Image: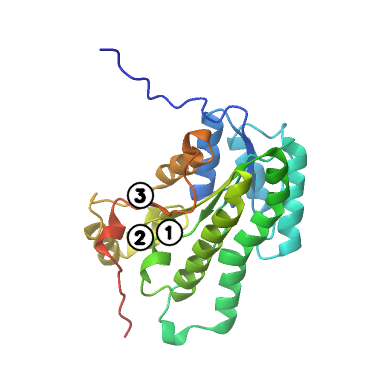
Amino acid sequence: MTQANNNPAGILQGKSGLIIGGTSGMGLAAAQQIVAWGGRVIPASSNPQKVEAALQALGQTETFPALTVDAKDRQSLVDCVKKAAEALGRLDFLCYFAGMLRSGPIDKLDEALLDEAFALNAKGALWASQAAFPYMKEQGGGAIVIIDSMSAHFGWGGTPSYSITKHAAFGVSVNLANEWGQYGIRVVPVSPGVIITDLNRDILTKNKPRTDSFVARTPMNRLGETKEVGSVVAFLCSDAASYMSGAPVFVDGGMSIRGAFPLKFD
């Protein structure tokens, strides 16, 4: 019997796109996987130094411009998408990783914090997608991947501004998928579980009891790695995922099947 070739190298050959929030963590991991699979990608974020470092890590410092973006500002997102499309010559995919997370009890949730989280986690995803829409519609299709969170679906206690606004980001995704499918544009919400990143590594290490509780609630008995989310996102940008749109894709080691995780505050 001939063994099937499961090597996906090249599945993004000829595909070009933009990752907002693509200079670190899961976003950079997605960019690296996209390049490994033959695609071209521009990583953008608010930090110019991180943008330069990401381009260097991807081997693209002489190929594409260093694009910075304020994901809380609509015009900045529009400008970033326009510059990326012009530099790439087309826009086959857009990935939105930008986001913010703050912890605290919901009865103490501050209006200014909630507004900021809405601007970055939900409205930014909408504005970026709107900016990408004309390019994708004209070329006959494309893929948009919006990162929400498993907490968007289960009301994860202790992070109300994050959970609420990531639920809104999920709402953005499904509405875009519903309206834009007729133009060949797929919109996929990705819901990671607890993923180890440079931003949370120290917290996870110092708060071992809480980290252990995350692991205990995960059937795979471990936390996730950025590359495990990145490879899923890269796949979703390819034509191999051509019939996937609207439905959430969980990358959480099975954590979501064990439900919400209510934190208690003294």
Element under label 1?
A: loop
Please tell me which residue is depicted at 28% across the width and 65% down the height of the picture: 259
Query: Which quadrant of the figure has residue 89?
Result: top right
Q: Residues within 10 Å of mark 1 (few under 14, many from 20)?
A: few
Query: Which quadrant of the figure has residue 88?
Result: top right
The image's colour scheme reads rainbow
> The N terminus appears in which quarter of the rendering?
top left
Q: Is residue 36 visible?
A: yes
Report how far apart the C-alphas of labels 2 and 1 lie in the structure. Answer: 6 Å
**Amino acid, disc 3:** Gly
Please tell me which residue is depicted at 60% across the width and 59% down the height of the picture: 125
Marks 2,1: beta carbons within 8 A: yes
Q: Which residue is mark 1?
A: 200
Q: Which residue is mark 2?
A: 204
Please tell me which residue is depicted at 59% across the width and 32% down the height of the picture: 39
Mark 3 vs 2, N-terminal side: 2
In front of the other: 237 or 38: 237
Establish if 34 lies above or below 84: above
| Label placed on residue 233 | none
Establish if 59 lies above or below 25: above
Where is residue 63? Give x, y as percent.
Answer: 72, 32
Where is residue 129? Give x, y as percent.
Answer: 64, 55
Report how far apart the C-alphas of labels 3 and 2 lie in the structure. Answer: 12 Å
Element under label 3?
A: strand
Marks 1,3: beta carbons within 8 A: no
Establish if 151 lies above or below 104: above
Q: Residues within 10 Å of mark 3 (few under 14, many from 20)?
A: many
